[in-house]
Image (spheres, rainbow, N blue to C red):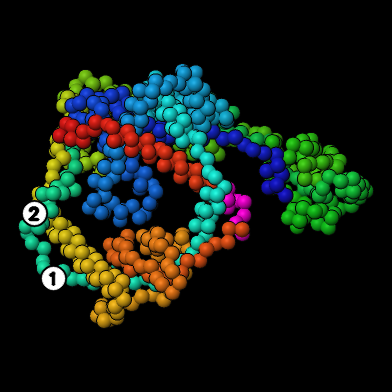
């Protein structure tokens, strides 16, 4: 009952939660929007350069997205030799597409007014507290993303114009009822088939991979075997946690703090009461409560009445008693009556709350009192130590910033000024940075060509509210192709897998030729110790088989009576499956409900929108002048 009273009194409590957002344009980084010179360009799109830094930032963001999506399985996926190249290629293509759309927007002369931008920003939930725009939160989040309000506003305007273009193109699609009917039938269709699974590993290669083959593959695919760009840093890390031991708190400090903050160390007024509860708000419930109150006033035992007549079964077991509570915690009417009771008048009248009717009895009262210093000394010491540590940290932060700037060629003087040793990272790439340096602000700085060429200390980079760092590049190593000797074994394994797969494919094709010619394949299957499955009934979205098998199964033509349609397909694991479709089971679309049809309509509209968008991108790419080798 006490918990219900608490919930009833508090209602919906609005809480402001600080959300660190990744802004919509962070994929390309700010530099991707502000423009770059053709120097250090990874690709040019109709004469506009996209920098290496933008591609690297896009790659990092895409990699982080995949890591979040796949969780524990990410390490396995990332171990693929082609993973980094594929992700970087996809990130580059995304930047190219964005740049083409931006150019199309500019060519069409589409515009968004400043007031529209301002209204859109103010309505973003990321910048709101209690449903209202909070300027301090807005500025804080921009600072965390290294953006000024003018940069964010201009970039956001660009995004709004792009959205305007896309909504114009893909916001007018419609789907006919006949299309929904046909889609419903196809979605519910089932197919009966036998499947023959052929594993590539069962086919040993007849000839070993030669050094010449390894050399040729390496020459044609050297971009797959890259050592990433690396840096070796010197850095001074200022960490508030390491300063705690340098701070002392005396008894005099504690006494002074206690006197200054005495109001913070009070035990609030509180009450302990018992009650008899009658559920509901009817006249009958009220009359029942009033009858019980009459018994109490006539001298009946309150505890006994609570045990036998209260409908709050939990407190009834304890003579109607509730836990201690302070003002403002329980239902307002209950709260007001409870705190009005005194030792002279310990019993209330019938009190109506949103849950029903109560008769309340005061058990014990504690008035507001200041806690003695001895009770709060430990927490004061903690607060004082944190306060003094923060003060020391802020002071050292300022001194570190000044000296690192005044003596920019090394970290020696900065290190001496704040009495923090210079640390060295060792060579690392953007993908394997040590934990303390694995921060986007640090990585963007140290892998920036301009910063490297200057050879100076960085400004103080704030890692958190209690950590800051100054970095200096000690050594830089350009990205380079790995020597053949380092990857020869890996390439040999890949080529062996390719040859095994090729042998398996030839075997499958020979089976297909015999089956299509009406010949038996029993001896071939017996030699390999494999056989078709029994007939399986599979749905379009069945998870019982490899997705490639299911997809190909539902692409096969419907067979004639007593006939089969067959084909083979490579699986996601690099193996093969021979499929024999014998029957198609159609869905009775009259059984489809309206919810299913609505979902199908939405799906078809989305599919149409995606097709229109892809057509736009394809057309832009077809007519664009794109140079992927710029700056190389």
Residue shown at 70%/36% (left/top)?
327
The image shows residue 616, relative to residue 73, as above or below, that is above
Residue shown at 38%/67% (left/top)?
565
For residue 99, side relative to residue 545 (left or right) = left
Could you classify mark 2 by the number of other residues whose Cα lies within 10 Å: few (under 14), some (14-19), or many (20 or more)?
some
The secondary structure that most of the magenta stretch takes on is: helix
| Image coords of residue 272 (percent x, y) | 73, 44
Which of 223/313 is in front?
223
Cα separation, mark 2 vs mark 1, equals 20 Å
Residue 206 numbered mark, or none: 1
| Image coords of residue 89 (percent x, y) | 26, 42
Q: Quadrant of residue 92?
A: top left
Which of 31/205 is in front?
205
Q: How many labels does the image show?
A: 2
Q: Give the range drawn in magenta.
A: 591-598
The image shows residue 282, relative to residue 342, as above or below, that is below
| Image coords of residue 204 (percent x, y) | 18, 71
Residue shown at 26%/49% (left/top)?
83
Q: Is mark 2 on a helix, strand or loop?
A: helix
Foreground label between 2 and 1: 1
* Residue hosting label 2: 215
Q: Does the magenta-highlighted stretch encompass residue 595?
A: yes
Q: Kindly check if marks 2 and 1 are in contact, taking CB atoms under 8 A apart as contact.
A: no
Q: In which quarter of the image is the C terminus?
A: top left
> Can see residue 363?
no
């Amino acid at each position: 009952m006490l918990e219900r009273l608490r919930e009833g009194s508090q209602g919906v409590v609005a809480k402001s939660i600080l959300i660190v957002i990744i802004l919509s344009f962070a994929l390309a980084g700010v530099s991707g929007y502000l423009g770059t010179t053709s120097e250090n360009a990874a690709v040019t799109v109709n004469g506009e350069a996209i920098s290496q830094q933008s591609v690297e930032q896009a790659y990092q963001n895409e990699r982080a997205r995949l890591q979040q999506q796949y969780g524990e399985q990410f390490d396995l996926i990332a171990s693929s030799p082609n993973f980094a190249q594929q992700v970087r290629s996809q990130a580059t293509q995304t930047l190219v597409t964005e740049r083409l759309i931006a150019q199309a927007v500019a060519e069409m002369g589409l515009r968004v007014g400043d007031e529209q931008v301002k209204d859109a920003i103010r309505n973003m939930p990321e910048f709101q507290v209690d449903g209202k725009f909070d300027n301090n939160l807005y500025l804080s989040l921009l600072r965390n993303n290294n953006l000024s309000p003018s940069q964010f506003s201009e970039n956001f305007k660009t995004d709004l114009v792009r959205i305007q273009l896309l909504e114009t193109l893909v916001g007018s699609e419609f789907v006919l009822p006949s299309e929904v009917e046909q889609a419903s039938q196809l979605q519910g269709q089932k197919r009966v088939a036998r499947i023959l699974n052929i594993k590539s590993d069962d086919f040993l290669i007849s000839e070993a991979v030669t050094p010449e083959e390894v050399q040729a593959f390496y020459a044609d695919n050297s971009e797959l075997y890259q050592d990433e760009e690396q840096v070796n840093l010197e850095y001074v890390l200022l960490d508030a946690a390491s300063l705690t031991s340098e701070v002392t708190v005396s008894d005099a400090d504690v006494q002074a703090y206690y006197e200054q903050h005495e109001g913070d160390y009070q035990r609030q007024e509180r009450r302990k009461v018992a009650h008899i509860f009658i559920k509901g708000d009817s006249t009958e419930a009220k009359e029942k409560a009033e009858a019980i109150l009459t018994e109490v006033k006539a001298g009946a035992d309150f505890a006994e009445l609570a045990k036998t007549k209260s409908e709050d079964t939990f407190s009834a077991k304890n003579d109607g008693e509730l836990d201690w509570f302070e003002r403002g915690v329980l239902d307002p009417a209950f709260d007001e009556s409870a705190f009005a009771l005194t030792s002279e008048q310990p019993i209330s009248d019938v009190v109506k709350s949103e849950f029903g009717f109560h008769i309340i009895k005061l058990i014990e009262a504690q008035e507001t009192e200041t806690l003695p210093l001895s009770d709060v000394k430990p927490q004061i010491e903690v607060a004082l130590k944190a306060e003094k540590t923060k003060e020391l940290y802020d002071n050292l932060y300022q001194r570190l910033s000044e000296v690192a700037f005044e003596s920019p060629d090394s970290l020696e003087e900065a290190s001496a000024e704040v009495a923090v040793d210079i640390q060295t990272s060792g060579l690392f790439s953007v993908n394997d940075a040590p934990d303390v340096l694995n921060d986007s602000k640090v990585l963007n700085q140290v892998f920036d060509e301009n910063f490297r060429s200057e050879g100076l200390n960085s400004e103080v980079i704030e890692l958190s509210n209690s950590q800051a760092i100054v970095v200096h590049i000690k050594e830089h190593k350009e990205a380079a192709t790995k020597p053949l000797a380092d990857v020869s074994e890996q390439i040999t394994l890949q080529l062996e897998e390719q040859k095994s797969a090729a042998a398996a494919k030839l075997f499958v094709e020979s089976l297909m030729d015999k089956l299509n010619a009406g010949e038996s394949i029993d001896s071939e299957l017996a030699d390999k110790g494999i056989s078709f499955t029994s007939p399986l009934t599979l749905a379009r979205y069945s998870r019982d088989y490899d997705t490639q098998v299911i997809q190909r199964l539902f692409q096969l033509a419907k067979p004639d009576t007593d006939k089969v349609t067959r084909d083979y397909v490579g699986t996601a694991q690099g193996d093969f499956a021979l499929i024999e479709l014998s029957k198609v089971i159609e869905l009775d679309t009259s059984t489809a409900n309206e919810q299913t049809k609505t979902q199908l309509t939405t799906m078809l509209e989305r599919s149409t929108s995606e097709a229109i968008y892809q057509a736009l991108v394809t057309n832009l790419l077809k007519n664009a002048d794109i140079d992927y080798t710029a700056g190389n």
